Amino acid sequence: MCRNPSIPDLRVGTADDDSRAAPFIADLAERYPELTVCTTAIANAIARLTACFAAGGTLLLCGNGGSAADADHIAAELVKGFERRRPLPEDVAGRLEAAHRQLGPRLRAGLAGGLPAISLAAHGAFLTAHINDADPLLVFAQGVLAYGRAGDVLMCLSTSGDSPNVVAAAATARALGITVIAITAGAGGALRDVSDVVVAVPASGAAAVQELHVPVYHTLCRAVEAAFWEV
């Protein structure tokens, strides 16, 4: 894969170094003790995401309704700075400054390192066209087929784990050599059988599940960002 030039090398250790994620997972468990049962899966998800970005891969995300909003939310936290400054590597900053006489200094000063994350739920024209013209069940699967490459990660958000269009996307991803991380609840539903990592929060009902999904994915974003950038 072609590595994003705005992402520096990993700060410490290797892509599967659990010690890097430990402080963020400990903080999550302290603030949300009920999520302690998910910490092993969360650590695994952090390692998979970090390895993906370090190798030049992309995170794809999908979900319906509130989970679609969560997919957009996660992408926003990763594409721009979340909790940390993300200074550009000097060679990239220099090329940006030289790219335009007036705008160059602003590009250099105003742009930050970004982790490539695409919400498949955000493309209104494509979504409506596919639902109208083709098989609506396969709307996210088509996005995975178009954007995904082996070594990428697909994050599937579903409060039940049984959303058919999300399960279809996960099955497509697995066929293409894309790692699947499911953020769901309970026993994991049908997503469990087509996912590499399942973070199933101990709650029932859409509102309660989604309330616990937020601290889970914020922890993922915090830990992955910290793997590449200092405070």
Image (spheres, rainbow, N blue to C red):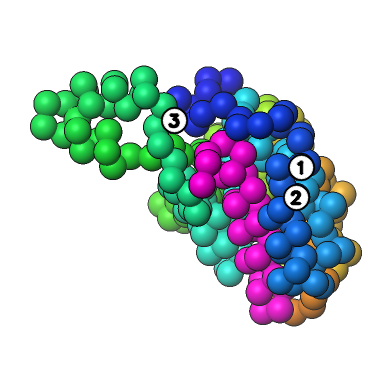
Number of labels in the image equals: 3
User: Which residue is located at x 11 percent, y 32 percent?
Assistant: 102
User: Which residue is located at x 71 percent, y 78 percent?
Assistant: 208
Task: Confirm whether the magenta stretch covers residue 227.
Answer: yes
Q: Amino acid at mark 3?
A: Ser
Quarter location, residue 176: top right
* Residue 16: percent from left, percent from top: 76, 34
Label pair 1/2, CB-CB below 8 angstroms: yes
Labelled disc at residue 22? 2
User: Which residue is located at x 57 percent, y 44 percent?
Assistant: 225
Q: Amino acid at mark 2?
A: Ala
Q: Is residue 168 at least partly visible in the picture?
A: no
- CA–CA distance in space, label 1 to label 2: 5 Å
Labelled disc at residue 19? 1
- CA–CA distance in space, label 3 to label 2: 25 Å
Quarter location, residue 18: top right
